[in-house]
Image: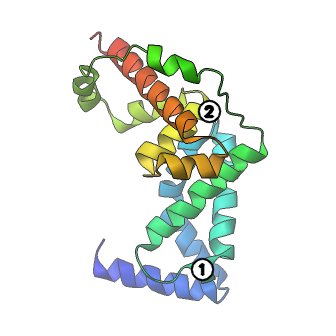
């Protein structure tokens, strides 16, 4: 991002801290698309993503005083929005099943030939595949792969064990590889 834009965003953040609706609107407008795509990765529908996004922006604007102007505002905002999406999932009954953990050792992993197919896919195609994952797998996959959370952080955030987190991630990866291979007949 260029220095000019960074300075503009810093001004918007400072003004929004002071309660400026105009600055809040500018931040909302600037980050809407990016944060909406984050929410879509965790949502089952566009309605859910809208709700998650609204909750996320509400938390961002309510907690601007906690942003210390160190590091990227975008990264801070993304973390707040991801946490809002996870809160939404918890609030509306996301449950994790642990009974299938033993299956992890019996899972047949798809060959890495899917990597070539991934290179040919558009981002929209890949996001669409991720959205087809069951909510639990999708949530863990997004937190680990897209947001960079560790299994310990995921476990703490979702109230599951690290091994359950790893199980969901492995199964999500395998499902995605199978679907990608089907798409490209590999």
Mark 2 residue crowding within 10 angstroms, few (<14) / some (14–19) / many (20+): some
Q: Nearer the viewer, residue 44 or 162?
A: 162
The residue closer to the viewer here, 112 or 124, is: 112
Position of residue 172 in the picture relative to residue 90 (left or right):
left
- Left or right: residue 104 versus residue 7 is right
Q: Position of 147 compared to 23: left or right? A: left
* Label 2 SS: helix
Tell me the distance, in whole angstroms, between the alpha carbons under discs 2 and 1: 30 Å
Give the quarter of the figure containing the C terminus.
top left
The label on residue 135 is 2
Q: Position of residue 65 (x, y in %)?
A: 62, 83
Q: In this view, does 139 lie above or below 39?
A: above
Q: Could you tell me residue 76's position as x and y percent?
A: 50, 69
Residue 13, numbered label: none
The answer to which image quadrant residue 72 occupies is bottom left
Task: Name the image quarter holding residue 71.
Answer: bottom left
**Quadrant placement of the N terminus:** bottom left
Residue drawn at (53%, 35%) of the image: 163
Residue drawn at x 24%, y 31% is: 119
Secondary structure found at label 1: helix
Q: Residue at x 25, y 22 (%)?
A: 112
Q: Going by the picture, which residue comes out furthest to the right?
A: 92
* CB under 8 Å between discs 2 and 1: no
Residue at the image point whose x is 70% and y is 59% from the top: 55
- Tell me: residue 27, above or below residue 120: below
Residue 74 in picture, x, y percent from top left: 45, 68
Q: Name the residue under label 1.
A: 66
């Amino acid at each position: 991002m260029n220095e000019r834009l960074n300075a503009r965003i810093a001004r918007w953040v400072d003004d929004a801290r002071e309660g400026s609706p105009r600055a809040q609107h500018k931040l909302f407008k600037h980050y809407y698309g990016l944060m909406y795509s984050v929410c879509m990765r965790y949502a089952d529908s566009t309605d859910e993503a809208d709700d998650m996004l609204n909750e996320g922006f509400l938390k961002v604007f309510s907690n601007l005083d906690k942003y210390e102007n160190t590091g990227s505002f975008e990264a801070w905002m993304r973390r707040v929005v991801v946490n809002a999406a996870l809160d939404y999932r918890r609030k509306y009954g996301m449950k994790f099943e642990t009974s299938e953990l033993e299956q992890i050792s019996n899972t047949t992993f798809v060959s890495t030939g899917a990597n070539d197919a991934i290179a040919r896919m558009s981002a929209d195609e890949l996001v669409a595949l991720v959205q087809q994952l069951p909510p639990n797998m999708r949530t863990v996959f997004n937190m680990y792969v897209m947001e960079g959370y560790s299994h310990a952080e995921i476990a703490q955030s979702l109230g599951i064990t690290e091994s359950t987190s790893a199980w969901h991630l492995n199964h999500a990866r395998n499902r995605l590889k199978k679907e990608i291979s089907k798409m490209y007949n590999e």
